[in-house]
Image (tube, rainbow, N blue to C red):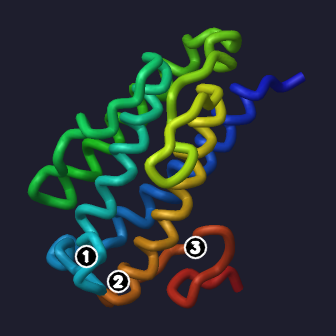
């Protein structure tokens, strides 16, 4: 029987290569693209994948201090290589984390200006799904940057399946 941790690791193993494919398809010369004045640049949005991995690490440590997130590096290739390293390190750490530890709680955002207790495993799922959301945002930026949008959950105009 698969544990919840195994299910999470399996899902993460499926999602990571797709996210990496979208990141690597982005034209590096257009990394500062901002579709709106309130939006993050593509490089800043890509950095969200790194901060989500860091938030997962913090959850495992028992305290999320989101104000202590590192700032993004100057280039998209640096963001991508940092993400690859952070992901590899997090997966190895999670594999070593006992299942019982993942059922402990940590303070996490539960609403606007609200913190509450959330199971560590639920924080990890939240961050993974948030990463899927940000990958979707980045795919829209990618189209706006005249990049080729790869297949994500099915064919795209640039990567048809037939």
Front residue of 68/23: it is: 68
x and y percentages locating residue 74 in the rendered image: 9, 56
x and y percentages locating residue 125 in the rendered image: 63, 41
Q: Earlier in the sequence, mark 1 or mark 3?
A: 1
Above or below: residue 139 compared with residue 67: below
x and y percentages locating residue 79 in the rendered image: 24, 51
What is the CA distance from the residue labelled 1 to the residue labelled 3?
A: 17 Å
Quarter of the figure that contains the N terminus: top right
What is the CA distance from the residue labelled 2 to the residue labelled 3?
A: 13 Å
Q: Is residue 55 left or right of residue 94?
A: left
Q: Is residue 74 left or right of residue 40?
A: left
Above or below: residue 101 compared with residue 108: above
Above or below: residue 22 compared with residue 131: below
Label 2: which secondary element: loop
The residue that disc 1 covers is 27
Q: Earlier in the sequence, mark 2 or mark 1?
A: 1
The residue that disc 3 covers is 151
The answer to whether the residues at label 1 and label 3 have Cβ atoms under 8 Å apart is no
Quarter of the figure that contains the C terminus: bottom right
Front residue of 162/107: it is: 107
The residue that disc 2 covers is 147
Residue at point 27%, 78% (across, down): 38
Task: Residue 154: name its quadrant.
Answer: bottom right
The answer to whether the residues at label 2 and label 1 have Cβ atoms under 8 Å apart is yes
């Amino acid at each position: 029987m698969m544990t919840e941790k195994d299910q999470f690791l399996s899902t993460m193993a499926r999602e990571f290569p797709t996210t990496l494919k979208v990141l690597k398809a982005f034209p590096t010369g257009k990394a500062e693209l901002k579709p709106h004045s309130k939006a993050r640049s593509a490089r800043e949005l890509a950095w969200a994948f790194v901060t989500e991995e860091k938030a997962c690490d913090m959850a495992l440590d028992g305290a999320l201090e989101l104000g202590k997130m590192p700032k993004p590096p100057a280039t998209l290739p640096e963001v991508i290589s940092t993400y690859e390293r952070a992901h590899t390190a997090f997966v190895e750490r999670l594999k070593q984390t006992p299942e019982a530890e993942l059922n402990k709680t940590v303070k996490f955002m539960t609403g606007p200006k609200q913190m509450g207790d959330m199971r560590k495993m639920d924080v990890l799922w939240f961050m993974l799904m948030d990463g899927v959301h940000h990958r979707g945002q980045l795919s829209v930026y990618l189209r706006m940057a005249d990049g080729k949008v790869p297949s994500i959950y099915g064919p795209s105009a640039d990567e048809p399946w037939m």
